[in-house]
Amino acid sequence: MARISGVTIPNEKQVWVALTYVYGIGPKTSYTILDKVKVDPTIRVKDLTDSEVTKIQDEINENYMVEGELQRIITGNIKRLQEINSYRGLRHKAHLPSRGQRTKTNARTRRGRKVTVGGTAKKGAAKT
C-alpha cells in the first residue's frame, strides 16, 4: 500500500481514484497532478513504481494544501466568522445551513433527526 500525505491509498483502485482519498484532492485535482508528473491515471496503485509515487508526493507537497493543514485553515476560517458574529458565523454556531438553503422542510442532515413537539402523543390509561 502506498502512503501519500500520510494517507494509505488503496492498492486495487486506479491512481486518479485513489488520490481522492486524500483530504483536499478531488477528481479534477487528481487528474491535474497526474498530468504534471506524467503518470497514466488509469494505472492501478499496486503497479506504480517507487519513483512515480515520490513524484506524485513531491507534486502534492509543493503545490497543494492537503489533510491537516487544510483542515486547520478551514476551521480557523469558520471560527473567525463566528467570532465576528457574521451571518454565516451565526448559522455555523446554530448548526444550520449557511449557504441559503431552505430550512422549513429538508435540511435534516444539518439539523439532525426530526423531533415532534406538541401534545399529539396518546395518553395511557390512568388508574382510578
Image (spheres, helix red, strand yellow):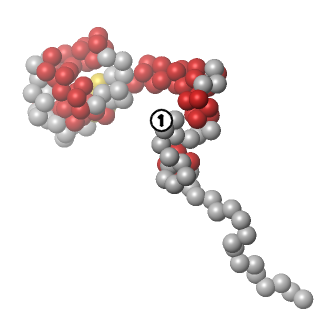
Quadrant location, the C terminus: bottom right
Residue ID for mark 1:
99
| Rendered location of residue 5, percent (x, y) | 33, 22
Element type at marker 1? loop
In the image, what residue occupies the spot 54% across and 25% down?
78
Label 1 sits on what residue type? Arg
Q: Quadrant of residue 67?
A: top left
Q: Nearer the viewer, residue 104 or 125?
A: 104
Q: Total marks drawn? A: 1
| Left or right of residue 42, residue 108 in this image | right
Please say if 123 is above or below 4.
Answer: below
Q: Nearer the viewer, residue 12 or 116?
A: 116
Please say if 106 is above or below 91.
Answer: below
In the image, what residue occupies the spot 75% across and 78% down?
123
| Left or right of residue 33, residue 8 in this image | right
| Rendered location of residue 119, percent (x, y) | 73, 70
Please say if 121 is above or below 115.
Answer: below
| Rendered location of residue 77, percent (x, y) | 52, 21
Q: Residue furthest top?
A: 62
| Rendered location of residue 102, percent (x, y) | 50, 46
In the image, what residue occupies the spot 25% across and 13% down?
58
Mark 1 is surrounded, within 10 Å at the Cα level, by few (under 14), some (14 to 19) or many (20 or more) other residues, namely few
In the image, what residue occupies the spot 13% across and 21% down?
35
Q: Quadrant of residue 19?
A: top left
Quadrant location, the N terminus: top left
From where the camera sits, is residue 1 visible? no
Q: Nearer the viewer, residue 102 or 12?
A: 102
From where the camera sits, is residue 77 visible? yes
Q: Quadrant of residue 118?
A: bottom right
